[in-house]
Image (cartoon, grey):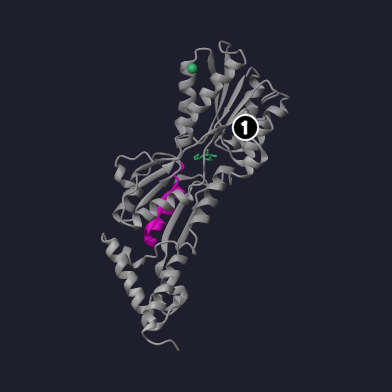
């Protein structure tokens, strides 16, 4: 039995270890119910010393840290409740995005994580948000399937004092205080990157003044990724009077839909020089249709194929010369959203908008090692 005077020393080390173990700031969810306490710093100090005192009096060990009866109850009280409304599972990109969020907001990291897959329907997302508001979660994370139609439900979240973090796609709302922060890609810049590459590629091929017929396979209408990538292409076409969009079809970011609509176009015309696909899954649909029509594509083919997302499958097809350019759109938003939440937990104000740095890939840049190293 250790002498009583050693308890504070023993407990300090032990608490330090425990606090180290929970790399996240453990804050009581009860705090949210009583309204956010701005003096978080003081709160943390008070929490820390009450922890120290409790441990000193009753020896260390998680059960006694918060004076609660059970381990589960202790954890339950300490976890931050993060509720995520995801677009769906329409693409490889989307699957990687959901996985990044799940891998970040784990129990051992100090979170209670709620996840709803909206299957691409805005009404499902609005219902999920209303459910999260009823549950009184600490944070709502929303990847909005489309940009408009969010004002009412975001006002309800604001009235319930639940911060909303928008991720990936954007919301177009009257009152920008309806969401706390947004993190995602600059989709217009992604489109501009593709156009700049195409312009250079055609020049290298001696086709700078040749008539270029472009088939545009769009993503989900009104999704930020569709709006931005489409704007990039349309600006590029406006800048080059020898470029023409011969058809704009809705691939909706899926392989099946893109295969269907590109097949229909190829029955009408095969005078196509470029197919601009707004994500990898729709590029795979276009490839399926081109192969069925016996049309060659890629670095050694008749049709130049441009794609977005740079998923593992998309980059592999690019490395094989099937896709001429793949523009990165990074889905690993879990840690980026967590950074915002931890800033808010510490009483700090995150940036309103945070754009992810991204690049693009052509076949000669790619190796199996590079692709494997990217994590999605
Ligand atoms: C882009 C994201 C898009 C991807 C598609 O950030 O919203 O949605 O480009 C996905 O693959 O379906
Ligand atoms: Zn130009």
Closer-to-camera residue (250/40): 40
The answer to whether 71 is drawn above or below residue 347 in the figure is: below
- Residue that appears at 39% across and 49% down: 165
The answer to whether 90 is drawn above or below residue 346 in the figure is: above
- Residue 303, position in %: x, y? 65, 22
- Residue that appears at 58% across and 20% down: 201
Answer left or right for 325 relative to 69: right
The quadrant the C terminus occupies is: top right
- Confirm whether the magenta stretch covers residue 101: no
Q: Which residues, given as a range, are shown in magenta?
A: 123-145
Secondary structure beneath label 1 = helix
Question: Visible in this render: residue 96?
Answer: yes
Answer left or right for 191 relative to 47: right
> Ligand 1 within 8 A of label 1's CB?
no
- Residue 291, position in %: x, y? 71, 28
Answer left or right for 260 relative to 293: left
- Residue 215, position in %: x, y? 58, 23
Answer left or right for 281 relative to 27: right
The answer to whether 6 is drawn above or below residue 206 in the figure is: below
- Confirm whether the magenta stretch covers residue 133: yes
User: Disc 1 marks which residue?
Assistant: 365
- Residue 338, position in %: x, y? 43, 53
Question: Visible in this render: residue 246?
Answer: no
- Residue that appears at 46% across and 16% down: 239
The quadrant the N terminus occupies is: bottom left
Q: Would you identify the image quadrant in which residue 264 lies?
A: top right
Q: Which residue lies furthest to the bottom in this view?
A: 1
Q: Residue furthest top?
A: 209
Other-residue count near label 1 (Cα within 10 Å), few / some / many at <14 / 14–19 / ≥20: few
């Amino acid at each position: 039995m250790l002498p009583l005077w050693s308890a504070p020393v023993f407990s300090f080390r032990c608490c330090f270890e425990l606090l180290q173990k929970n790399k996240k700031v453990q804050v009581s969810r009860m705090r949210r119910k009583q309204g956010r306490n701005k003096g978080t710093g003081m709160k943390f100090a008070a929490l820390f010393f009450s922890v120290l005192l409790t441990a000193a009096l009753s020896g260390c060990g998680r059960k006694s840290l918060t004076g609660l009866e059970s381990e589960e109850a202790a954890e339950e009280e300490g976890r931050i409740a993060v509720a995520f409304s995801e677009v769906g599972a329409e693409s490889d990109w989307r699957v990687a995005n959901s996985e990044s969020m799940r891998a970040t907001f784990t129990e051992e990291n100090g979170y209670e994580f709620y996840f709803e897959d909206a299957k691409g329907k805005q009404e499902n997302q609005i219902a999920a948000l209303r459910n999260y508001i009823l549950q009184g979660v600490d944070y709502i994370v929303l990847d909005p399937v489309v940009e408009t139609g969010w004002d009412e439900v975001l006002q309800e979240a604001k009235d319930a004092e639940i911060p909303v973090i928008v991720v990936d796609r954007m919301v177009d709302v009257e009152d920008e205080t309806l969401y706390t922060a947004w993190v995602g890609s600059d989709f217009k810049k992604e489109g501009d990157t593709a156009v700049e590459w195409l312009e250079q590629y055609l020049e290298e091929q001696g086709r700078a003044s040749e008539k270029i017929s472009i088939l545009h396979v769009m993503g989900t209408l009104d999704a930020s990724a569709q709006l931005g990538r489409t704007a990039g292409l349309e600006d590029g076409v406006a800048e080059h009077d020898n470029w023409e969009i011969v058809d704009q079809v809705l691939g909706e970011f899926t392989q099946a839909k893109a295969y269907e609509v590109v097949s229909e176009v190829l029955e009408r015309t095969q005078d196509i020089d470029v197919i601009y696909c707004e994500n990898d899954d729709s590029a795979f649909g276009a490839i399926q249709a081109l192969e069925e029509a016996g049309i060659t594509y890629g670095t050694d083919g008749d049709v130049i194929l441009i794609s977005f997302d740079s998923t593992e499958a998309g980059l592999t097809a690019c490395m094989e010369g099937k896709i001429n350019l793949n523009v990165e759109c990074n889905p690993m938003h879990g840690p980026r959203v967590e950074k915002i939440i931890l800033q808010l937990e510490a009483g700090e104000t995150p940036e309103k908008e945070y754009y992810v740095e991204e690049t693009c890939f052509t076949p000669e840049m790619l190796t199996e090692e590079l692709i494997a190293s990217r994590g999605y």
